[in-house]
């Protein structure tokens, strides 16, 4: 979580304009999630380690003053349990907002081959995170040209020496836009590389 928060500070504060505003929203959101997650961790520690002790303590035959203090302190722990439910609800709410913000932010990076490569390489994870909103994510970033994502991914993978993986990406691009000259050109480059490696 520390690394995620620090990365968010470096990444999302570097843009200006509309993308900058969305970046600041994301930066704040990740920071807030971090804050509530740390508090949740501490609260769960209290519940796990101290609440059972206090509950056991008030069952014992204690002097009146100690019994009163024990009951009052247990009340604080019960409030902590309620605050945990609120922290979980806030984290879930902000994560849902981040899912809305990410497509807006990533649209400014539609020509970034590393983004396209990540979306292709981590397709299963991205689909799991975005669920039914996955087509909206791709649509927001690439508009009516989802083939552009696969083309960029194929080029990035090829340049990184991942020829078989680049062939999978370009095959998806060809399926989506069989008449695209840039896609066919990349397909030929990848095919030539595969042929050379097979010799």
Image (spheres, grey):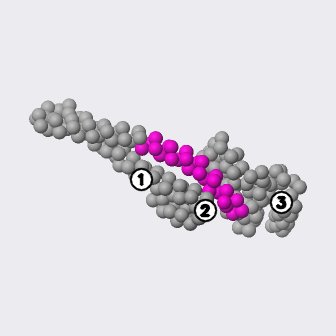
Residue 57 position (above or below residue 34): above
- Marks 1/3: CA–CA distance: 45 Å
Say if the magenta span includes residue 41: no
Say if the magenta span includes residue 100: yes
- Which label belongs to residue 17? 2
Give the secondary structure at mark 1: helix
- Which label belongs to residue 183? 3
Label 1 crowding class (10 Å Cα cut-off): few <14, some 14-19, many 20+?
some
Q: Residue at x 46, y 56 (%)?
A: 31
Residue bounds of the magenta highlight: 87-112
Q: Position of residue 1 (x, y in %)?
A: 46, 56
2 or 1: tag closer to the N-terminus: 2
- Marks 3/2: CA–CA distance: 32 Å
Q: Quadrant of the C terminus?
A: bottom right
Residue 161 in sight from this viewpoint: no
User: Which secondary structure class fits the magenta region best?
Assistant: helix
Q: Residue at x 42, y 53 (%)?
A: 35
Give the secondary structure at mark 2: helix
Q: Position of residue 108 (x, y in %)?
A: 66, 60
- Marks 2/1: CA–CA distance: 27 Å
Q: Residue at label 1?
A: 35
Q: Residue at x 70, y 45 (%)?
A: 135
């Amino acid at each position: 979580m520390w690394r995620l928060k620090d990365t968010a500070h470096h990444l999302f504060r570097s843009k200006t304009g509309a993308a900058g505003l969305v970046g600041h929203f994301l930066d704040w959101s990740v920071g807030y999630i971090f804050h509530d997650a740390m508090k949740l961790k501490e609260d769960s520690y209290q519940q796990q380690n101290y609440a059972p002790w206090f509950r056991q303590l008030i069952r014992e035959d204690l002097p009146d003053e100690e019994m009163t203090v024990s009951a009052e302190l247990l009340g604080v722990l019960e409030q902590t349990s309620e605050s945990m439910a609120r922290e979980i609800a806030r984290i879930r709410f902000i994560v849902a907002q981040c899912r809305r913000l990410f497509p807006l932010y990533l649209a400014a990076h539609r020509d970034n081959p590393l983004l396209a490569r990540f979306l292709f390489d981590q397709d299963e994870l991205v689909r799991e995170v975005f669920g039914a909103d996955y087509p909206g994510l791709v649509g927001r970033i690439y508009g009516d040209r989802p083939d552009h994502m696969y083309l960029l991914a194929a080029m990035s993978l090829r340049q990184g020496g991942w020829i078989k993986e680049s062939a999978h990406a370009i095959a998806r691009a060809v399926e989506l836009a069989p008449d695209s000259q840039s896609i066919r050109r990349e397909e030929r480059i990848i095919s030539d590389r595969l042929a050379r490696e097979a010799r």
